[in-house]
Every structure is written in C-alpha cells, then in structure tokens.
C-alpha cells in the first residue's frame, strides 16, 4: 500500500511539472541538504549539495531550454518511509529556438527519507542533450550586435 501511495504522489508531481513547467515543485520536496547529481559534462553535468543549488540548476536549465517538459513513463518504488527508493523513467521534450524538437529520455534514481528527497541521481542521453544545446546556442541572436 505504501509503495502505491508513493508511486501515485510521484506521478502527480511529475504530471504537474509537465503541465506547468514549474520545477520548484520538485525543489520543495528536497531536503535542505539534498545531494543532486546529473551525470555528464557541464553545463548540465553537476554534483550539487543543498536545496538552493538544486533550485539554481533548474533555473539554469529553464533559461537554456525554455518550455522543457519531463513526463514520467515508468515509476518503481521500493523500501520503507525512512529509506525509500524511487526510480522514474522520463521522456523529455522541448522546442528549440530554431523551431526544431528536442526529445530525449532519462532515468531518475531518488532516495526519500520520511517524504523528503535526500538524493537525486539523473542519467540522460548527454550526446543528444549537447547537440540540442549547440542548436539552441546557434539559433540565439548575438548579444551586443557587434
């Protein structure tokens, strides 16, 4: 029963984020000392600690990929309230500045302690992400006009 409740809450959270684009909903779930890891090279590759750093990562993400949407495909839950593991397979999409579509997939491995996210580990196809960021940068107008 506990696993079913957690799965439903996680699905509702991701569905709300997908509808609104408001990643602060995820940040609000994080413990003050949350550990966040996004596997890969910068600018998205990160190993951060703390809710403020976690929030800043999402802000940067939204600046670089406005309209980014993450939708849950599968959710697996195991463990108990004091040590719960949640694994989410995500589909990722955005429309880039040149009008092309960005699609990707990722896996999020989260550890919850008494309903608070204490560890968030994300794997995404970073080659696809890097190509999208290059297209995004090329489509943006140059600042200063030379």
Image (cartoon, grey):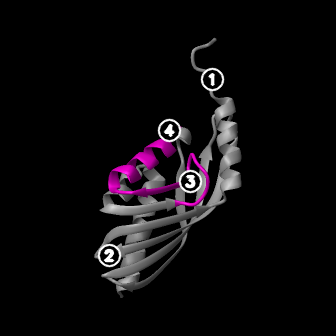
Q: Could you tell me which secondary element the residue under label 2 belongs to?
A: strand
Q: Quadrant of residue 81?
A: bottom left
Identity of the residue furthest to the bottom in this view: 1
Q: Nearer the viewer, mark 3 or mark 2?
A: 3
The CA distance from mark 1 to mark 2 is 45 Å
Distance between mark 3 and mark 2 Cα atoms: 25 Å
Q: What residue is disc 2 on?
A: 113
Report the residue marked by disc 1: 141
Q: Is residue 39 magenta?
A: yes
Give the quarter of the image for residue 31. Answer: bottom left
Kindly report the distance in space between the C-alpha atoms of the residues bearing marks 4 and 2.
Answer: 31 Å
Whichever of labels 3 and 2 marks the residue nearer the N terminus, that label is: 3
Indicate the quadrant containing the N terminus: top left, top right, bottom left or bottom right.
bottom left
Of mark 1 and mark 2, the one earlier in the sequence is 2
Residue matched to label 4? 63
CB-based contact (under 8 Å), mark 4 and mark 1: no
Mark 3, mark 4: which one is toward the viewer? 3
123 up-or-down from 21: above or below:
below
Q: Is residue 33 visible?
A: yes
User: Who comes first in sequence, dot 4 or dot 1?
Assistant: 4
């Amino acid at each position: 029963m506990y696993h079913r409740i957690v799965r439903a809450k996680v699905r509702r959270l991701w569905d709300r984020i997908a509808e609104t684009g408001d990643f602060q909903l995820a940040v609000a779930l994080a413990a003050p000392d949350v550990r966040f890891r996004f596997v890969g090279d910068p600018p998205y590759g990160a190993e951060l600690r703390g809710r403020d750093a976690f929030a800043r990562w999402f802000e940067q993400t939204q600046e670089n990929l406005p309209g980014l949407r993450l939708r849950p495909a599968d959710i697996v839950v195991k463990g108990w309230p004091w040590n719960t593991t949640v694994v989410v397979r995500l589909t990722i999409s955005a429309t880039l500045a040149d009008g092309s579509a960005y699609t990707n997939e990722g896996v999020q491995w989260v550890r919850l302690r008494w309903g608070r996210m204490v560890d968030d580990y994300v794997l995404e196809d970073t080659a696809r992400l890097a190509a999208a960021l290059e297209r995004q940068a090329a489509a943006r107008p140059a600042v200063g006009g030379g």
